[in-house]
Amino acid sequence: MNPIFSFRELQKTAKNTTGNTTEIKVAVLGNHTTNFFVKALENQLKVAGFNPSMFESDYDQIDITLIDGDSDLYKFNPEIIVVFESVLKLKDKFYSIKDTESQSEFHASEQNIIQNRVSNIRANGSDAKIVYFSYELLDDEVYGNLFSKIPHSFYNNLWQLNNSMIEFSRNEPDFYVFDINKYLKGIEEYRDWTALINSDLHYSIDTFAKFSHYLAQFFNAFKGHFKKCLILDLDNTTWGGIIGDDGLENIQVGSLGIGKAFTKLQKWAKLLKERGVILAICSKNTESVAKEPFEKHNEMVLRLDDISIFVANWKNKADNIRYIQEVLNIGFDSMVFLDDNPAEREIVRQSLPGVTVPELPKDPAYYIPYIESLNLFETVSYSANDKDRTSQYQQEAKRKKLISSVTNMDDYLKSLEMEGNISPFTNDDVSRIAQLTQRSNQFNLRTQRYTEKDITEFMNSENHLTYTVKLKDKFGDYGLISVIILEKKNDNSYFIDTWIMSCRVLKRDVEYFALNKIVNDVKDKGINIINGEYLPTPKNKLVEDLLTKLTFENDTEENKYLLNTTNYKSHKNYIENE
């Protein structure tokens, strides 16, 4: 029996490496005893780096709690509402129905209940994200494998209810399905039947802990903390064998033998890349030899154009990962490093404790099931533009080479031949804008997280000025790299609600290019004052002096600033209007 899927292994990946805590308010509503679950979730949130405040509804009082606008839930004002119903209670409800016609419509009536609950939450003024547990696919074995043909089968109804919940989620902002069935896999005794009878405890303590672990990962993604980069070793990790010794024809990859295990890993990595995760290579190898399989092996899934940064040399791997981090300009805690060598893993862990380094099994056949069990790449957003990230970072590597050939920064910026476009929000960009607010941590003046619905409201508001900045240079197109939202406070002032920029364009003077446009627009409206604020977080120290650099003056309160546009002098930059 393979022991790698233990909860202890999951905990290794959940450690808070930053030493910082983030405030979070979570409410839990259930139709069964949830106090052990709430405690487990609170503990896992602390492990993940949160300072949680928890609310638990009264026993089996979901609908009363949600309907009553004066309930303690709304006074608590949670950021996230978790609704966790037990399928056992649902089964009792189903069995109380006497006619088969009504049983056939059970899934539809339950879906209506879910939608009404969401409507009640919104009607009572809560904009909390709603995480709804799917229903455990518990077969009562009344119809066996004929269930799919029997519309009044309980098991049939469960499938349809879960599917309708997924469909609802696609079109309902801030409603997410937490699939309980994924996380019941691998737990032999996930329910304690004695505890169920005596205490209405529908799952074991260990099962609650596992659910809580994965919820904490999901909530981390809500807060903009998630893995952005997968770094792969090559020999005996990406393929079997040692390319420098065995040669191209003898490495193991493809459809035969253990080569299938490495092919599965490559396919998984390729799918992550298509989703927007950055792929990098870090290998102790001669570069030309290391690249040969990517260029010449017919059964390789990954190719060089899938890799954003390829580092193969004989240096320390920790130093090479530092180089990768420098080029990507993301946090070490956004990186995952896969290497079959225990010694190399330990060096990276000790040198770069922020990097997640899974303890890969010795047998490559277990690589994918083990990695998938860790759920390292949780996300809460996806945009079609995510697929372009690889080429963007390949272009950035070329820019990094260019900077070493010029003598000063002005010459470098001129040589990039940059063109910029700054314009109001458009419908086409709503998804990308929302994603930037959710993902950006470093160049983020106030770290406000917004949904697509929020962005649409800003776009249509008469009291807001909205800006997206797009940039390209002679190496390629950066795409949409900055988001700015100004709120009109009175007849003579605007307030900078949001200023976000991708770290890929740091030191390109984009902020100066943007402010010149903003000041012109504000002056055209006859307004003289722009107020700004810096809200510090553990990750946005990068912008603590942004407003000062932009010639804002300190206001009377700490971290608050003011710009009088009357005497504004345009900032020099080398970005031409597109």
Image (cartoon, grey):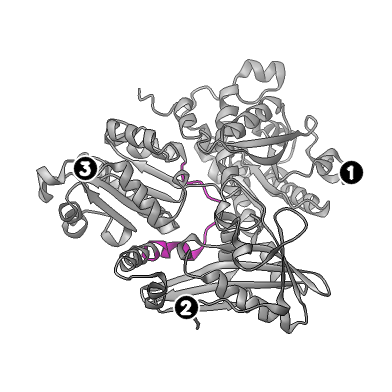
Q: Which residue is mark 3?
A: 235
Q: Where does residue 514 sit, x and y in percent of width and height?
A: 58, 74
| Crowd class of label 1 (few under 14; some 14 to 19; many from 20; radius 10 Å) | few
Residue 379 is a magenta residue: yes
Task: Look at 23% across and 50% down and name the residue there.
Answer: 312
Question: Going 78% across and 57% down the picture, which residue do you hit?
Answer: 556
Residue labelled with disc 2? 574
Bounds of the magenta segment: 376-392
Asked whether residue 271 appears in the rendered view, the answer is no
**Left-right relation of 411 to 284:** right
User: Which of the two marks, 1 or 2, is nearer to us in this view?
Assistant: 2
Residue 563 image offset from top left, x and y in percent:
71, 70
Report helix, strand or loop for mark 3: loop
Q: Looking at the rendered structure, which numbered label has been put on residue 70? A: 1
Q: Which amino acid type is shown beneath numbered disc 2?
A: Tyr
Mark 2 and mark 3 lie on one chain; the one further toward the N terminus is 3
In the displayed structure image, the side of residue 366 where residue 196 appears, left or right:
right
Q: Secondary structure at mark 2?
A: loop
Nearest the camera: 244 or 139?
244
Earlier along the polypeptide chain: callout 3 or callout 1? 1
For label 2, the crowd category at 10 Å Cα-Cα, with few meaning under 14, some 14 to 19 and many 20 or more, is many
Single out the residue that lies furthest toward the right. 70
Measured Cα–Cα span from mark 3 to mark 1? 61 Å
**What residue sits 43% from the left and 63% below the top?**
387
Residue 239: image quadrant is: top left
Query: What quarter of the picture does the N terminus occupy?
Result: top left
Residue 156 visible, this angle: yes
Residue found at x 78% / y 44%: 77
Q: Amino acid at mark 3?
A: Asp
Label 1: element kind: loop
Q: Position of residue 23 (x, y in %)?
A: 67, 41
Q: Is residue 385 magenta-colored?
A: yes
